[in-house]
Image (cartoon, grey):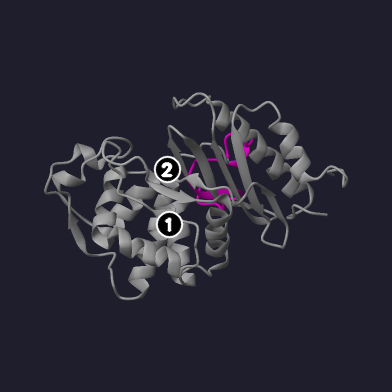
């Protein structure tokens, strides 16, 4: 049982004492227990903006202004390097909006994101983001890193709040929120949240049995930021965790980057605390 005098904020501070960079944390046990470390610090979103884009898409669908079945054509001007699979397809290929949303999240497809940005419009996406209650989150540009220095801006609190409302079915609608969670559960990259989880907790084999542990999340990485956030499902319930890091000295991306290593340690510590307190972060 965690010692009551050793608060989770102090534990996180001790864990990050030797970290070369700035890491902000927002965790919510969805029962009134919130852990914060510089949670209102603005961060470049990197690919975490794609979660807000997914929410904006479903917001527009709910208002009758977009459709998951509408087919969009992959145009040459939407090409961008980086993660994803659409870049290997021929220009002129057509895909339904739903498939683009899935690729944007599951393999962080940059071209799928650009196609959806062109479909909804930057201003329309930001209108939806604001309508959903996120005042510190902005999509600045499409994903063309040779043209623009910024992609998006958010805070750990706003990213965490998005996942908390998704978990409660209070973001767009219970049906839409459930569909978004199903997509986020299928994404392929957990850079920090599950990095140090015991492998036995995350059995990837499809046995047909109910999964005791799963994560619905989206990470993001650019030269200036490493971020990860999502819903962690356990036998004791669900909690939300967001980790965002910047101001580190090494901009190169690799699996053992200190931001990912230290972020993984914080995530494991919070998992153990949540399980020890049987579904809470606070005594």
Instruction: Give the main secondary structure, helix, strand or loop, of the magenta stretch.
Output: loop
Is residue 161 visible to us here?
yes
Q: Report the side of 117 relative to 203 (left or right).
A: left
Q: Which residue is at a point 34% across and 69% down the rendered structure image?
A: 60
Residue 272 - label: none
Mark 2 neighbour class, 10 Å CA radius: few under 14, some 14 to 19, many 20 or more:
many
204 magenta-colored: yes
Percent coordinates x, y for residue 243 in the rendering: 58, 43
Q: Nearer the viewer, residue 218 or 22?
A: 22
Residue on which disc 2 sits: 46
Residue 93, position in %: x, y? 14, 49
Please state which of residues 50 and 45 is positioned toward the viewer in this rendering.
45
Q: Tell me the residue that label 1 is attached to.
A: 52
Point out the tag, 2 or 1, that comes first from the N-terminus. 2
Residue 30 lies, with reference to residue 6, above or below; the image says below
- Tell me how far mark 2 sits from mark 1, CA to CA: 12 Å
Q: Is residue 20 left or right of residue 281?
A: left
The question of residue 212 being in magenta is answered with: yes
Coordinates of residue 81 in the picture (x, y in percent): 27, 35
- The foreground one among 86 and 117 is 117
Q: Dot 1, how many residues are within 10 Å of its Cα: few (below 14), some (14-19), or many (20+)? A: many
């Amino acid at each position: 049982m965690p010692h009551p005098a050793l608060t989770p904020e102090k534990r996180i501070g001790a864990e990050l004492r030797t970290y070369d960079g700035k890491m902000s944390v927002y965790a919510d046990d969805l029962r009134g227990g919130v852990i914060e470390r510089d949670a209102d610090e603005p961060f470049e979103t990197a690919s975490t903006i794609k979660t807000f884009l997914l929410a904006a898409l479903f917001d527009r669908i709910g208002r009758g202004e977009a459709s998951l079945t509408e087919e969009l054509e992959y145009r040459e001007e939407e090409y961008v390097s980086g993660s994803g699979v659409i870049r290997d397809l021929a220009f002129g290929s057509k895909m339904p909006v739903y498939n683009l949303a899935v690729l944007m999240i599951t393999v962080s497809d940059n071209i799928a994101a650009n196609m959806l940005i062109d479909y909804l419009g930057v201003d329309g996406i930001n209108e939806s983001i604001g309508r959903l209650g996120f005042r510190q989150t902005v999509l600045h540009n499409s994903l063309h890193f040779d043209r623009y220095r910024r992609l998006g801006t958010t805070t750990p609190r706003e990213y965490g709040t998005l996942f908390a409302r998704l978990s409660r079915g209070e973001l767009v609608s219970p049906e839409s929120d459930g569909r978004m969670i199903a997509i986020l559960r299928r994404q392929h990259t957990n850079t920090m949240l599950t990095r140090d989880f015991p492998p036995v907790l995350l059995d990837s084999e499809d046995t047909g049995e109910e999964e005791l542990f799963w994560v619905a999340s989206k990470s993001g990485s650019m030269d200036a930021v490493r971020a990860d956030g999502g819903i962690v499902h356990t036998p004791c319930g669900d909690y939300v965790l967001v980790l965002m890091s910047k101001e580190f000295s090494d901009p190169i991306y690799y699996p053992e980057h200190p931001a990912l290593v230290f972020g993984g340690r914080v995530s494991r510590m919070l998992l153990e605390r949540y399980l020890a307190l049987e579904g809470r972060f606070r005594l």
